[in-house]
Image (spheres, coloured by chain):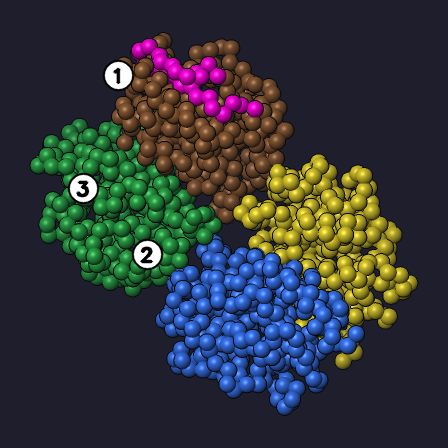
Chain colours: A yellow, B brown, C green, D blue
């Protein structure tokens, strides 16, 4: 069967799974999404892109942005300074858990994919103000996605900032632990803003393709990310990119990926392609039900697992 | 031996224990205290008071104030509303722990003697502003202590407010759990202020004597606290008044008591007397080393245990 | 109203509460009990005893036995050796929790009223074999209860021993932590046997009366327990005698008490009386629903709280 | 530089790191090992093997065996039955932790690489007796390693079995949770025996080479393991093969690997080679200090990371 037809067929099968999940409701603005949407775009290195379903749906990056704030902070600070503040290990706890911060010495976040780690990472992006740090990150995302018009969804940003007490609690705990420096509200501003960057599947697929191509833009040949930092990002996507279902995803799909509570998933097929998926209905672990199903089907059909 | 002589003798023995402890240093202003001070005042119902040692030392109430914010909130709101927001059980965890807030449903503080509980209690004192809530509490303390000049130590207050990220973290977590309502900074202001109320042993002993007398001022005969709320306060002092050494204190001393990181201890001998102690050097559990030793010696000598 | 009539009236009101609870089912033999039974016996020091309801129901001591294994071990070993192995603090965790054994140094049980602590205590009763240790404890219980025919319920014992994997797990953890020495199965045998001692309310009330009388048998004048160990037992009953509802019970009833999953409760009114209650339907915390209600009503009516 | 010379040079550099670690002492028999040994053997698919250093040192598989008990259990039971009993996620806790078994529903082990999971896996190997289950596993290891004389080290086995209270505690907890069925001691016997299988670097390297070759013996062309189960094993080696340093190892080395407390490491370079390393001095996470250093150097020199 022709590749586009395969995608169309698998997408229809996966979309039915949306009924098993629910749209995130902890941020009011996210709760308005239509649950049974499902869209996908695939950017293949050096080939045409392919799309299917509701691929034009706009959604906010949410936790997908953690991959790119990490990469930018690594480019700004180098490995040593980043890993002095944030660990490299999966936690087994929820993305917003405080338990290990209190019980495990020295109280630094276990990795940059949980909220505690991502807030610290936000604070380490170079810039003399929160605004400047965010603008640099936005510019980085725009360049990777190949679209200079990308912007934040202001309604989502304001909704997040207004319902952020758990993250605020995390951030003050980190400040108490001396992992976070400076003004907590400034760091949260940067964090909420990069979570609120609005994209489509095509943007996400293009960012994933750059990672699949070891940091080099296949169109221009320009190295946008040093290969070493792409490696690090791919490791975190495998070990903790899909919340507490990362191990399951690695077994069933086998690709470095990062999901967000908006229902988006970024997946990397190293050396081959970048994939962007949107499907707002989430399973209990916080990942897009239909999106995970679609990626699993595609991985099985085309033997994409890196394992 | 005459009672005053007993106290003098035991105080000298206990003062030597100060070397085993350390002055609290998490609040810079507290770290300035002289560690080997030890003072005591005892107010006996219907009898003369007795003092020994450094009984004129001024110190801030710190966690001792939690007893009185609880009583005032009970008087303002009644039992049902208070215990709808705060539990009745000892925790076995540190006074500033967040673990049970995350792991145990429904995420309300286990009791009013840990920081999380005391912050919620502060928010439940009647008043249309943080200022008004604090002024009401201060007036209550002044009345119990019999001194209308009692005030906060501004240096300590500012020092606490400036180093309060762990409490701020707790408070935002409580707000996320919908146990705390309104503006976090307002509640912390009241909380830090009542921790910073400056007293002497005599003040503390008089407050304790009112509790020992079931809420009635023995001088005026006026009921300052309903007996039921005195009962509740005494229960919490027994089960969790001395941080994670409350069980040990109940076994070794056997009196309802509450300690603070300034080194102060309030102890109640029901029906007989109120005791105020100050000894800034703390043991690892956060209680005055010499103060606990002195109370243990007195309890043994005069058979004061309520058990 | 005459005292016996008060008890009858309150018992009828409390018995209706049984429907809110459930008979323990984790031990098959316990699950056979009739849920809506409720009985009480009160032994007053130097006065007649009073009974009402299903006071002749036989039940096993279960956790009530922890009070007496503790006292006997204290009499055998002294305070220092006991508290070298077991702590004095309430935990805030379930009676069979392992979390603090793993997370809190040095891994000794927090107190003798949780299973971990009670198993260690069982191992410290003097005796050259498990059989001898149990026989000494049984003789102690018989003497306190004033009935030399008291024995274990073999069906319950075998049922407990056969469904004891959680306790076995606790015990091996304690052995790993070097808090428990010797053969785990031997210590569990003693522990399960003393949990399976079968009694009536009258037995429990008499044992409680001895505690209320500071360890002295009021009939013979003989000191069966040194007063110091009665004090210690009463402290543990107040701080952790009613599982994770001990704080609530202290506030609402105000008496040293210990409950068991069979639905029995032993309560001490210091200086006045001992109370034995049986009501098999348990609330979520593991205490007799109707039994707690009855004790609360009695305490309020006769103003029995020690606070 | 010629490949063998590279290995020799890097081995010498890495061996110096042994001084930073310590030989495991929790099993008396392991504590006798010489800390500064370091040996390596590499089996390349379709090429000569290479060795350096103390490659003839004999050591027990310990946790390395968990990879092969998992694979054999998968071959015996299929994915569904295995993952019904054991999860797929890294834990962030110690390999012998019980905390998540108690706190996270439904109380099944998070993955097959922690002790709790590996004990359950041992119980799922087909066989009508513990002896038969172990013999089948031993035969499997012998076939993969290409040496029919491989056997257990009896001294180590007896030492493990005698100091196994923490594992015994875990096993009884799992039985209580109904994840483990049958007799606990039987399952522990199988578990301790497969931990005590004695090998050299060459054996481990050959087993790793079979994994690197997707389960096919490159010499005979025979499929010894279905490719799907090799995938699953590699995922677990990446996400939790190196205890709580698995994330760090994935970032710094980038290879599926499994370590044991004997100081052995099995590492897989997919499609290329299998590596066996022995270096008894362990770091705080329980991995061979010099062994990890050597693998990191080799991975950097030859660009072996799969990320």
The location of residue D259, given as percent across then percent down, is: 57, 68
Q: Which mark is residue C207?
A: 3
Can you identify the residue that label 2 sits on? Answer: C181
Q: Nearer the observer, disc 1 or disc 3?
A: 1
The residue under the point 49% across, 36% down is B95
A254, above or below B280, in the image: below
Query: Disc 1 and disc 3: Cα gap in Å?
Result: 38 Å
Residue C132 is at least partly visible in this image: yes
Q: Are marks 3 and 2 in contact (CB under 8 Å)?
A: no
- Furthest toward the bottom, the residue is D220
Can you identify the residue that label 1 sits on? Answer: B1
The residue under the point 77% across, 49% down is A77
Across the whole image, how many numbered discs are drawn on residues?
3
User: In what quadrant of the picture does the N terminus of chain A appear?
Assistant: bottom right
The location of residue A298, given as percent across then percent down, is: 71, 72
D193, above or below C89, in the image: below
Residue C154 or residue D169, whichever sits in front: D169
Look at the numbered disc 2 and give the secondary structure of its residue.
Answer: loop
Q: Is residue C70 left or right of residue C142?
A: right
Query: Disc 3 and disc 2: Cα gap in Å?
Result: 30 Å
- Displayed quadrant of residue A36: bottom right
Look at the numbered disc 3 and give the secondary structure of its residue.
Answer: helix
Q: Which mark is residue C180?
A: none
Range of magenta residues = B32-57
Discs 3, 2: same chain: yes
Crowding at mark 3 (Cα within 10 Å: few <14, some 14-19, many 20+): many
């Amino acid at each position: 069967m022709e590749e586009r037809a395969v995608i169309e067929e698998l997408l229809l099968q996966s979309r039915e799974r949306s009924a098993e999940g629910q749209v995130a409701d902890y941020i009011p603005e996210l709760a308005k999404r239509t649950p049974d949407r499902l869209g996908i775009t695939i950017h293949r290195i050096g080939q045409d892109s392919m799309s299917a379903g509701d691929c034009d749906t706009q959604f906010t990056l949410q936790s997908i942005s953690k991959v790119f704030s990490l990469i930018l902070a690594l480019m700004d600070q180098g490995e040593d300074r980043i890993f002095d503040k944030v660990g490299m290990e999966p936690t087994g706890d929820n993305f917003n858990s405080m338990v290990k911060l209190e019980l495990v010495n020295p109280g630094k976040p276990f990795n940059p994919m949980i909220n505690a780690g991502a807030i610290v990472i936000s604070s380490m992006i170079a810039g003399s103000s929160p605004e400047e740090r965010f603008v640099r990150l936005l510019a980085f995302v725009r360049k990777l996605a190949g679209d200079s018009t990308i912007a934040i969804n202001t309604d989502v940003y304001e909704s997040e900032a207004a319902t952020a007490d758990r993250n605020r609690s995390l951030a003050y705990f980190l400040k108490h632990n001396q992992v976070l420096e400076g003004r907590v509200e400034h760091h949260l501003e940067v964090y909420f803003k990069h979570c609120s960057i609005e994209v489509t599947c095509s943007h996400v697929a293009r960012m994933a393709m750059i990672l699949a191509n070891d940091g080099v833009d296949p169109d221009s040949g320009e190295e946008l990310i040093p290969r070493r930092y792409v490696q690090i990002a791919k490791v975190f996507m495998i070990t903790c990119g899909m919340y507490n279902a990362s191990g399951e995803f690695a077994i069933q799909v086998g690709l470095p990926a990062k999901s967000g509570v908006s229902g988006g998933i970024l997946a990397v097929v190293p050396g081959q392609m970048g994939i962007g998926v949107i499907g707002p209905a989430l399973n209990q672990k916080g990942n897009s039900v239909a999106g995970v199903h679609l990626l699993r089907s595609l991985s099985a059909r085309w033997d994409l697992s890196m394992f």
